């Protein structure tokens, strides 16, 4: 299938036909392709535009919610994992320009590459069609990817949320340490500590290591929330 054909299909999914076709081609061009241009500058712009769009959306959606909570919600939606999900809704992987080496390395499926391409597309839309068009597309995709955008749904995976927040705020990833395992083999429980930036934030027990990690992450999130107040 011609990649130019997939660009046409992509523009139909975007609901927008670029007048400047060079702009969408640039947005879809990965640096590995060794062209005189790539999508990194548009990615930079798109990231800022998405930060504004999602921030405004949350501001109007969650009236009465404090700034700290809104920041956590935004961090849970404005990140590589979330943008990869939106990129897949657009089938962006079909349309990107990458090197043969990247192609052979399954580049069209790489989360970082897809996320960056999505940011670049939003940046390109913003440049040519303005903020409202970029906002319409981004919010439509967000609501499709997350049918229920609320505190419980966003924070359900506490480990992922905690990692996104600590990376955004402190530049570190939480570490989980098995403190002890106790009880009979048929009813064993695990106690896990979560360490952030060299400090144990919380400990929790669960019937599996995974359950204990989620509980410890949830407690750490609560502690971070109180520290921000």
Image (spheres, rainbow, N blue to C red):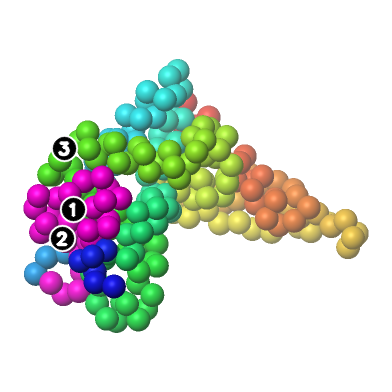
Looking at the rendered image, the disc whose residue lies closer to the viewer, 2 or 1, is 2
Q: Which residue is mark 1?
A: 42
Element under disc 2: helix
- Whether residue 194 can be seen here: yes
Over which residues does the magenta segment extend? 7-35
Examine the image and state in which quarter residue 72 appears: top left
Q: Is residue 56 above or below residue 205?
A: above
Q: Position of residue 126 (x, y in %)?
A: 18, 42
Q: CA distance from mark 2 to mark 3?
A: 17 Å
Q: Are marks 2 and 1 in contact (CB under 8 Å)?
A: yes
* Number of the label disc, if any, that sits on residue 130: 3
Q: Is residue 135 left or right of residue 59?
A: left
Q: Position of residue 110 (x, y in %)?
A: 38, 67
Q: Is residue 83 magenta?
A: no
Q: Position of residue 132 (x, y in %)?
A: 22, 33
Overall secondary structure of the magenta section: helix
Q: Is residue 215 left or right of residue 189?
A: left
Examine the image and state in which quarter residue 40 appears: bottom left
Closer-to-camera residue (128/48): 128
In terms of sequence position, does the residue under pointer 2 or pointer 3 come before the other?
A: 2
Residue drawn at (43%, 19%) of the image: 63
């Amino acid at each position: 299938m011609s990649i130019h054909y997939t660009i046409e299909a992509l523009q139909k999914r975007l609901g927008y036909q670029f007048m400047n076709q060079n702009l969408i081609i640039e947005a879809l061009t990965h640096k590995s392709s060794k062209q005189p241009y790539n999508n990194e500058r548009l990615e930079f712009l798109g990231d800022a535009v998405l930060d504004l769009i999602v921030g405004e959306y949350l501001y109007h959606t969650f009236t009465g919610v404090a700034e700290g909570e809104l920041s956590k919600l935004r961090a849970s939606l404005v990140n590589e994992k979330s943008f990869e999900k939106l990129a897949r809704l657009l089938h962006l992987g079909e349309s990107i320009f990458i090197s043969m080496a990247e192609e052979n390395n399954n580049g069209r499926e790489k989360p970082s590459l897809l996320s960056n391409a999505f940011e670049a597309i939003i940046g390109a839309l913003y440049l040519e069609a303005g903020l409202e068009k970029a906002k319409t597309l981004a919010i439509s995709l967000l609501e499709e990817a997350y049918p229920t955008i609320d505190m419980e749904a966003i924070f359900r995976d506490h480990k992922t949320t905690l990692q996104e927040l600590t990376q955004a705020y402190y530049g570190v990833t939480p570490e989980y340490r098995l403190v002890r395992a106790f009880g009979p083999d048929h009813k064993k429980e695990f106690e896990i500590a979560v360490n952030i930036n060299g400090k144990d934030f919380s400990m929790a027990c669960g019937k599996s290591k995974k359950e204990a990690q989620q509980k410890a992450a949830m407690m750490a999130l609560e502690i971070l929330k109180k520290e921000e107040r």
